[in-house]
Amino acid sequence: MSLCEDSGPLALNRQLCFALYAASRAVTRAYQPMLQDLGITYPQYLVLLVLWERDTEEGGDAGTSVGALGERLMLDSGTLTPLLKRMEQRGLLERRRASRDERVTLVSITDAGRALEPRARAWVEQQLDASAVSRQEVEQLHRQLWQFLEKLGGSG
Amino acid sequence: MSLCEDSGPLALNRQLCFALYAASRAVTRAYQPMLQDLGITYPQYLVLLVLWERDTEEGGDAGTSVGALGERLMLDSGTLTPLLKRMEQRGLLERRRASRDERVTLVSITDAGRALEPRARAWVEQQLDASAVSRQEVEQLHRQLWQFLEKLGGSG
DNA sequence: GGAAATTATATTGTGCACAACTCAAATTAC
DNA sequence: GTAATTTGAGTTGTGCACAATATAATTTCC
């Protein structure tokens, strides 16, 4: 790919920032068949991943606050609030105010939301098996990305 | 980071897809001070990178078609057309129809657009020098991302 | 050479991201 | 105990992404 080969004063860094940007969108595109089948979007899927996870923990059904979701997904309320409302309208989750602190909105998964988990899991497993990318490559890339993310966060 | 450590049925793949998504947004955030200084957005910066590059080639000023830009940035006309119109309004580039083929819109950089290049380059160089991430790490991550992108494209 | 198919861009509509702001509830300081 | 501050969601406005569609110019095929 020519983007990967040429050089120039801005080339090195552009390529990392652009490679990240392009790879992120490519992965979202790769998820589209599954997401369309489930009737959700990619960020909605990420929200479900967090809720599914909390759901299987003990004492899980207290709900997850919008703030906790945002910290986990690195998204703010301006993104999450309308997204969660759409998911609530589709019956995938419920939102209610916390009685202990009325400022907090607690989100909890519904049965309809739970029902999507095995379908998503099956698809992901199948993709990993069928993929040209080995699990080892996936793990290595993942590790490097988190190292990079931590250094970005630490240095500004 | 707990996102990087826990496990579960959907964990491995989620972490790569989410790591890419989070890293891409983190990089965009890291560019914000420079972008705000130049008065542009991140995708607009990517467009300028392509135009700056073509500008320094010989016979560069024939302009770049919307299609060529889209292929390079992996974006379609639905994204590019309004973005390019905003950049045109800010005087960073010009759009005109190709005389050889009236379907084609040619984009060419203006002096105002050219003037941003040294400022962007200086900032990027400075960031690379000041960063906690070594150039070697940047290069390795970049290489792996392109390998991954090529495999994604090849296998679906 | 004219109808049909193709191509390049533009338009429309939905859903993120995110900055900036509002507002109410809770905390703190005094 | 109440005024000032902080905190957690929500709102508003701008700008991507991208699917689906539209439109007009070009090419292809008889």
Image (cartoon, coloured by chain):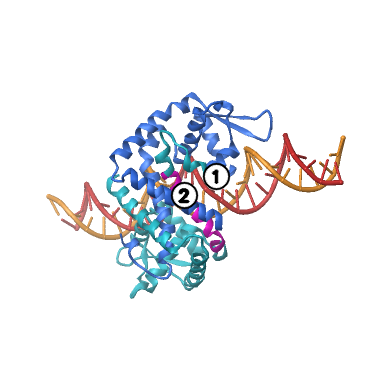
Chain colours: A blue, B cyan, C red, D orange
As drawn, B21 above or below B47: above
Disc 2 or disc 1, which is closer to the eye? 2
User: Sequence order check: which comes first, mark 2 or mark 1?
Assistant: 1
Q: Where is residue C8 in the image (x, y as percent from the top left)?
A: 33, 58
As drawn, B124 above or below B149: below
As drawn, A38 above or below C10: above
Task: Give, as a three-letter code, the residue at label 1.
Answer: Leu
Q: Which chain carries label 2?
A: A
Bin the neighbour count of mark 1 within 10 Å (Cα to Cα): few under 14, some 14-19, many 20 and up: some
Pick the front one: D8 or B134 = B134
Q: Where is residue A39 in the image (x, y as percent from the top left)?
A: 42, 33
Q: Mark 1 points at which residue?
A: A75
On the image, which quarter does residue B70 sit in?
bottom left
- Please tell me which residue is depicted at 55% across the width and 38% down the height of the picture: A69
Q: Position of residue B85 (x, y in %)?
A: 47, 60
- Please tell me whether residue B8 belongs to the stretch shown in magenta: no
Q: Range of the magenta residues?
A: B16-35
On the image, which quarter does residue B39 sit in?
bottom right
On the image, which quarter does residue A75 sit in?
top right
Q: Name the residue under label 2.
A: A146
Q: Is the magenta stretch mostly helix, strand or loop?
A: helix
Q: Is mark 1 on a helix, strand or loop?
A: loop
